[in-house]
Image (cartoon, grey):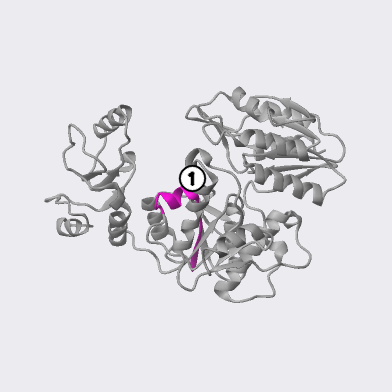
């Protein structure tokens, strides 16, 4: 609990006799003893929504980033640039960080797989940890909490670490460019880190590739003095760019020998090499880890055999990720024809859509273009954008994803691979703010179960 004197010392706010025993950033989670941070936008609609919410919200004290008329009772305005520091000081009192090692993983693609591989590899060496990222808060082989983002807010991150990290030895977290820019990791320093790849994504937010790269390089400022940042040996250009910025950058250890099918794709082998380099740098080299005990995380290179075919589900949703998995499948199974089903998300970087179509044209023998998460956009327009990049290949455009998947199943012929890309672990399709239940993995499992006899 924070008293008036403590809060005044932290942020200069006099709350009188009001009691504060929690901190929130979502108004719907707040209660009468909460300190609620509410960030106002710049348009009239934001103000109207704020005033409506405040009529329905309980809070002990309200912190705003700008003055409004009328000002709510029990409220103060604090410059938004000081929020991370103020929130950290409050969180240090209410939700102290556990004394564990912190690992940060960034990169356009591969973050989820690598964090999970670190969690698995460390477990097999007797080190129990926690991962926080796209799949939620996880322990080895178990999801504790789903929160629907790659990176939670600073407030939620600290709460998760305090609640779930107390009896752990480490936490490995996905580090997104958005969250780095928004200071969602404020006050956390990494004992080790990895940067897996850098290709086009999120230009709806960062606008240019240079700004995107600069955002990701903020992870270098969060490394402890003894920490290293590992880059796959194959990513020579990325390594050289980063090495010019920091002496802490290292190439990952190259792994030799027989590996499971999951790692026959180069990008997954890269992920494994970064994961193993980090684990060894923290806890010393090991020689007895059985790589065949390591599994792909949910929705990443999920493979289901069906008669003479393979059906693969993967989260690949960028041009580079789609190219990587298509190339990996072609190299691992050169005698198979490859069919690819994918879409692109709405309200996101529109320029990558035709690039995705172009990638599919290069690698796929047949293409099914469908919906992903159209959000507020017309899904047919998204499909049209994708089709502008497809040349010289058989393709079908089927807006409804479930219908498209069923057509692709029906058209499977001997020794073909069907790749369902873009959804991965997700169990919904987001349309105009509504999550409609849907899962590629469930569709595959049900199809194989119905037809495997």
Say which of 269 and 122 sits in front: 269
Q: Residue at x 59, y 65 (%)?
A: 230
- The vertical placement of 344 against 194, above or below, is above
Q: Residue at x 29, y 50 (%)?
A: 23
Residue most toward the left?
16
Q: Secondary structure at mark 1?
A: loop
- The vertical placement of 436 against 282, above or below, is above
Say which of 272 and 170 sits in front: 272
Which residue is tagged 1? 149
Residue 170 in magenta?
yes
- The vertical placement of 56 against 214, above or below, is above
Residue 152 location (% of width, % of height): 44, 49
Q: Residue at x 52, y 30 (%)?
A: 375
- In the rendered view of the protein, which quadrant contains the N terminus? bottom left
Q: Residue at x 41, y 56 (%)?
A: 185
Q: Residues within 10 Å of mark 1 (few under 14, many from 20)?
A: few
Say which of 226 and 22 sits in front: 226
Residue 91 in magenta?
no
Q: Is residue 175 visible?
A: no
Residue 20 location (% of width, % of height): 22, 52
Residue 371 location (% of width, % of height): 62, 29
Residue 353 location (% of width, % of height): 63, 34
The span picked out in magenta is 169-184
């Amino acid at each position: 609990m924070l008293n008036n004197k403590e809060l005044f010392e932290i942020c200069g706010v006099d709350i009188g006799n009001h009691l504060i025993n929690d901190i929130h950033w979502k108004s719907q989670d707040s209660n009468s003893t909460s300190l609620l941070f509410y960030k106002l936008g710049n348009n009239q609609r934001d103000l109207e929504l704020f005033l409506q919410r405040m009529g329905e919200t309980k809070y002990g004290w309200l912190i705003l980033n700008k003055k409004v008329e009328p000002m709510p009772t029990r409220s103060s305005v604090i410059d938004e640039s000081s929020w991370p520091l103020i929130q950290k000081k409050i969180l240090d009192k209410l939700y102290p960080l556990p004394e564990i090692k912190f690992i940060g993983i960034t990169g356009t693609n591969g973050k989820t797989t690598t964090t999970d591989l670190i969690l698995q590899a460390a477990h097999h060496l007797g080190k129990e940890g926690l991962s926080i990222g796209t799949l939620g808060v996880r322990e080895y082989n178990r999801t504790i909490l789903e929160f629907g983002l790659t990176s939670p807010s600073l407030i939620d991150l600290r709460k998760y670490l305090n609640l779930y990290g107390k009896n752990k030895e480490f936490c490995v977290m996905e580090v997104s460019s958005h969250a780095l820019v928004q200071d969602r990791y404020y006050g956390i320093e990494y004992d080790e880190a990895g940067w897996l790849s850098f290709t086009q994504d999120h230009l709806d937010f960062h606008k240019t590739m240079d700004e995107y790269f600069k955002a990701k390089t903020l992870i270098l400022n969060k490394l402890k003095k003894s920490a290293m940042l590992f880059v796959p040996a194959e990513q020579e250009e990325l390594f050289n760019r980063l090495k010019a910025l920091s002496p802490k950058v290292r190439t990952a250890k190259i792994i030799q020998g027989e590996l499971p099918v999951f790692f026959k794709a180069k990008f997954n082998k890269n992920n494994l090499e970064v994961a193993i380099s980090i684990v060894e740098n923290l806890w010393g080299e090991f020689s007895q880890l059985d790589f065949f005990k390591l599994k792909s995380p949910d929705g990443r290179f999920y493979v289901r055999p069906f008669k003479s075919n393979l059906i693969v589900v993967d989260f690949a949703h960028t041009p580079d990720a789609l190219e990587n998995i298509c190339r990996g499948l072609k190299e691992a199974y050169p005698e198979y024809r490859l069919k690819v089903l994918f879409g692109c998300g709405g309200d996101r970087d529109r320029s990558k859509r035709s690039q995705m179509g172009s990638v599919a044209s290069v690698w796929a023998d047949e293409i099914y273009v469908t919906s992903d998460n159209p959000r507020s956009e017309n899904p047919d327009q998204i499909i049209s954008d994708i089709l502008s990049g497809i040349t010289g290949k058989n393709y079908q455009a089927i807006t409804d994803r479930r219908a498209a998947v069923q057509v692709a199943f029906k058209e499977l012929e001997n020794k073909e691979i069907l790749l369902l890309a873009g959804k991965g672990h997700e169990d919904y399709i987001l349309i105009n703010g509504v999550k409609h239940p849907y899962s590629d993995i469930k569709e595959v499992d049900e199809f194989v179960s119905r037809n495997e006899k």
